[in-house]
Image (cartoon, helix red, strand yellow):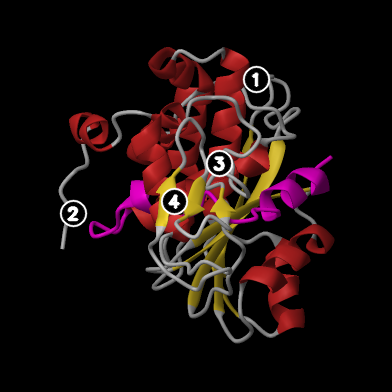
């Protein structure tokens, strides 16, 4: 069932100030917990002039921002919430400049906020099964008429038909570079659907995947059940969004953006899914995967 759109007006009614955001943060992540000192549940109250909740027994307190993306930030919590709201509503992403304009924070702060929110969008890889389309594309770099892919970053992606997409930076399109992401993302016994790149054929043979191809070089884009239109559709949306919203992205941080747009593709298509609430539920998760992906591309 399609969820009614959550509007800006509704956001401001629900989250009027820092206090309402703090109360929401506490209830979402700590409201179900019992006090370790007295064993009572639901007996915490917000201590005056602080951001701490204290049990009525007076022997235990909780700081809701501890262990979240807000912990070391001096930025108002309501501004963080609004930045998360903005990034949950846009199909094409939100630039730091837009967060700066809407919240009044500095550009540097807005950029950091957006980076932390993107980390929340980065899901660990899950095994794709059944029919899986795989493809590679080139992103970024300066246009050079003499070299089609000059200074561009190579991205490999795979999508399970009627399922989720995954994308990551790879060094090149050799068998050695593509083997790990395919082995990590695609379950044995799946049917791999690709173009005629030799590396895919070799990997499918070695790893025991079924394999069907289309000959893009011969203007063949579908042969029976063999096509890569789904993953190519994701590439098109990704590139339009990157070019239109962010313009230039450092290769160092490209993995974060790939995670963001895979997240949008995987979750936002579900009409019953409330993306804003889902992101708010993730503010306390230890998202180390995004950091690892950035480090692996240095």
Sequence-wise, the earlier of marks 1 and 4 is 4
**Local secondary structure at mark 4:** helix
Q: Nearer the viewer, residue 80 or 25?
A: 25
Q: Which percent across, then down, holds residue 248?
A: 61, 22
Residue 242: give its label. none
Q: Which percent across, then down, holds residue 243?
A: 50, 25
The residue under label 3 is: 118
**Local secondary structure at mark 1:** loop
Q: Are marks 3 and 4 in contact (CB under 8 Å)?
A: no
The residue under label 1 is: 143
Q: Which residues are magenta?
A: 269-298
In whole angstroms, how far apart are the C-alphas of marks 2 and 3?
A: 23 Å
Residue 3: give its label. 2
In whole angstroms, how far apart are the C-alphas of marks 1 and 2?
A: 42 Å
Sequence-wise, the earlier of marks 2 and 3 is 2
Q: Residue at x 76, y 67 (%)?
A: 179
The reply to whether residue 54 is in sight is yes
In whole angstroms, how far apart are the C-alphas of marks 3 and 1?
A: 27 Å
**Local secondary structure at mark 3:** helix
Disc 1 or disc 4, which is closer to the eye? 4
Q: Nearer the viewer, residue 152 or 147?
A: 152
Q: Is residue 116 above or below residue 127?
A: above
In whole angstroms, how far apart are the C-alphas of marks 4 and 2?
A: 25 Å
């Amino acid at each position: 069932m399609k969820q009614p759109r959550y509007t800006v007006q509704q956001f401001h009614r629900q989250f009027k100030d820092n206090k309402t955001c703090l109360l929401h943060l506490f209830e979402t992540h700590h409201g179900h917990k019992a006090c370790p000192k007295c064993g009572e549940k639901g007996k915490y109250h917000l201590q005056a002039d602080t951001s701490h909740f204290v049990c009525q027994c007076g022997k235990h307190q909780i700081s809701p921002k501890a262990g979240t993306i807000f912990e070391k930030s001096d930025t108002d919590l309501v501004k963080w919430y609004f930045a998360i709201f903005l990034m949950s509503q846009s199909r094409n992403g939100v630039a730091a400049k837009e967060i700066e304009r809407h919240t009044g924070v500095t550009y540097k702060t807005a950029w950091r906020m957006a980076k932390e929110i993107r980390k929340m969008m980065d899901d660990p890889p899950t095994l794709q099964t059944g029919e899986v389309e795989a493809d590679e594309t080139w992103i970024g770099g300066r246009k050079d008429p003499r070299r089609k892919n000059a200074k561009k970053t190579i991205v490999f992606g795979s999508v399970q038909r009627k399922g989720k997409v995954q994308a990551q930076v790879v060094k090149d399109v050799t068998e050695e570079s593509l083997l790990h992401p395919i082995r990590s993302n695609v379950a044995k016994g799946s049917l791999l659907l690709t173009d005629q790149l030799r590396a895919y054929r070799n990997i499918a043979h070695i790893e025991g995947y079924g394999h069907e191809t289309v000959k893009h070089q011969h203007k063949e884009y579908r042969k029976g059940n063999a096509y890569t239109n789904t993953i190519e559709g994701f590439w098109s949306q990704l590139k339009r969004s990157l070019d239109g919203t962010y313009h230039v992205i450092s290769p160092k941080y490209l993995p974060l953006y790939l995670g963001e747009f895979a997240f949008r593709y995987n979750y936002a298509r579900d009409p019953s899914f409330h993306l804003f609430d889902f992101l708010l539920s993730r503010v306390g998760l230890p998202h180390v995967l995004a950091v690892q992906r950035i480090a692996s591309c240095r």
